[in-house]
């Protein structure tokens, strides 16, 4: 079946426009538009030794340059991970620079300093109790809105600097729309004692996926928050009896759920990981890092990447011939909040 070159949605033979996005469709015979079907496998070719070299150089040079080299070090690691990641025989690539990260960090720090200045003024001009209350509320409100803006900025930057088969990825979500999704979900999660959390997280995933493009083709997402709720309810009930182990179990279940409901053109991404194996991988990696004072960190990261990527496939029909280059400009200001974003799992160098 043919697919729209803009959104990647399937359309019927003889259609003059895409029902999903409205793009005009050229009347080209379907037989002349090659579609590649089958299962495409991911592979990771990186090694712990090479990763350790990059990691050690970043740490040592950051120490002697007052952390300035860390921006170049992080870029080198991202580039290495992307170039060692393969899909269907082709490698990814990463085109970001350390200077971009440094400038993005400076802008982010300027924004934070401005925020602290406003809080300081509010605290000084009001009486002691009112100033403390106002300052606290301003900080919480600012971070509630800054976090989604930083996430969108980082997502947009990282995708704009990532390529596959010579074509760039891009993220086209509007920051204001994501702020609405993020803030509303965060407040509802808090008000429902976090019972709304899986629906909130699913809405975030949907927004990020459906606004991500590879060239001119868009990713899709068909996961439902209600389908994820049952897993979260089990995790929520068992969190105390299991001393938090159920949270790791839910993370694995959510990871698999998110990926298995991500689509691209006529294909679907699948991750065939088993929860016990993934939980053991995380626990053993944590113990290895602790007992080696994090000297084993590069090897544990390679171990994790290889385990996940080699169980990941893209199944179905894809027409690379229909995809056009549509690289978009993106700044790195969102990357200035990197230390808060690394835990979100989006610093793999290949985005999703």
Image (tube, rainbow, N blue to C red):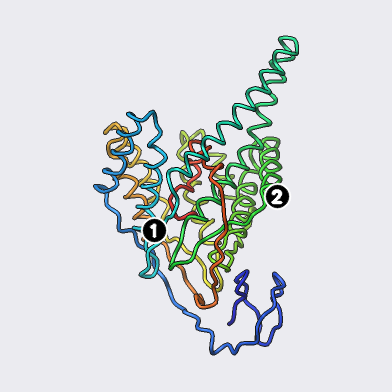
Which residue is nearer to you in this view: 51 or 241? 51
Residue hosting label 2: 177
Q: Is residue 69 left or right of residue 221?
A: left
Q: Is residue 317 visible?
A: no
For image coordinates 56% across by 71% down, the residue present is 265
For image coordinates 54% across by 90% down, the residue present is 31
Image marks 1 and 2: residues in contact by CB distance under 8 Å: no
Label count reads 2
Q: Secondary structure at mark 1?
A: helix
Q: Earlier in the sequence, mark 1 or mark 2?
A: 2
Residue 28 drawn at (x, y percent): 61, 87
Residue 176 drawn at (x, y percent): 70, 47
Q: Quadrant of residue 209?
A: bottom right
Tag shown at residue 309? 1
Which residue is nearer to you in this view: 265 or 115? 115
Looking at the rendering, in which quadrant would you find the N terminus? bottom right
Q: Specify few, some or many for label 2: CA neighbours under 10 Å numbering under 14, 14-19, or 20 or more.
A: few
Q: Is residue 34 left or right of residue 226?
A: left
Residue 49 drawn at (x, y percent): 24, 47
Q: Is residue 145 visible?
A: yes
Q: Quadrant of residue 74?
A: top left
Q: Secondary structure at mark 2?
A: helix
Examine the rendered structure and indicate whether residue 58 appears above or below residue 176: above
Q: Is residue 119 left or right of residue 213?
A: right
Q: Is residue 218 left or right of residue 277?
A: right
Q: Specify few, some or many for label 1: CA neighbours under 10 Å numbering under 14, 14-19, or 20 or more.
A: some
Examine the rendered structure and indicate whether residue 239 appears above or below residue 176: above
């Amino acid at each position: 079946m043919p697919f729209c070159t803009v959104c990647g949605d399937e359309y019927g033979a003889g259609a003059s426009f895409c029902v999903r996005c409205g793009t005009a469709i050229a009347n080209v015979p379907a037989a002349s538009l090659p579609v590649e079907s089958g299962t495409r496998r991911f592979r990771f070719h990186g090694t712990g030794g090479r990763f350790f070299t990059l990691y050690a150089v970043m740490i040592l040079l950051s120490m002697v340059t007052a952390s300035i080299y860390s921006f170049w070090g992080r870029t080198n690691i991202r580039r290495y991970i992307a170039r060692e990641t393969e899909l269907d025989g082709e490698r990814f690539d990463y085109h970001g620079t350390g200077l971009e990260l440094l400038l993005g960090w400076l802008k982010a720090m300027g924004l934070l300093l401005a925020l602290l200045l406003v809080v300081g003024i509010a605290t000084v001009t009001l009486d002691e109790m009112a100033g403390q209350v106002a300052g606290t509320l301003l900080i919480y409100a600012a971070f509630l809105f800054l976090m989604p803006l930083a996430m969108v900025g980082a997502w947009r930057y990282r995708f704009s600097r990532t390529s596959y088969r010579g074509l760039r990825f891009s993220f086209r979500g509007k920051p204001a729309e994501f702020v609405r999704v993020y803030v509303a979900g965060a407040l509802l999660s808090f008000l429902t004692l976090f019972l709304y959390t899986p629906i909130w997280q699913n809405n975030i995933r949907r927004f990020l996926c459906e606004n991500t493009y590879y060239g001119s083709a868009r990713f899709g997402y068909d996961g439902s928050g209600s389908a994820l709720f049952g897993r979260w309810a089990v995790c929520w009930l068992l969190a105390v009896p299991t001393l938090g182990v159920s949270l790791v179990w839910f993370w694995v279940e959510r990871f698999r759920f998110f990926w298995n409901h991500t689509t691209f053109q006529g294909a679907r991404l699948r991750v065939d990981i088993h929860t016990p194996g993934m939980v053991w991988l995380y626990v053993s990696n944590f113990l290895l890092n602790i007992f080696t004072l994090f000297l084993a960190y590069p090897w544990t990261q390679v171990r994790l990447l290889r385990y996940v990527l080699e169980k990941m496939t893209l199944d179905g029909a894809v027409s690379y011939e229909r995809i056009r280059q549509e690289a978009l400009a993106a700044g790195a200001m969102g990357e200035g909040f990197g230390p808060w974003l690394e835990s979100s799992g989006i610093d793999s160098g290949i985005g999703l």
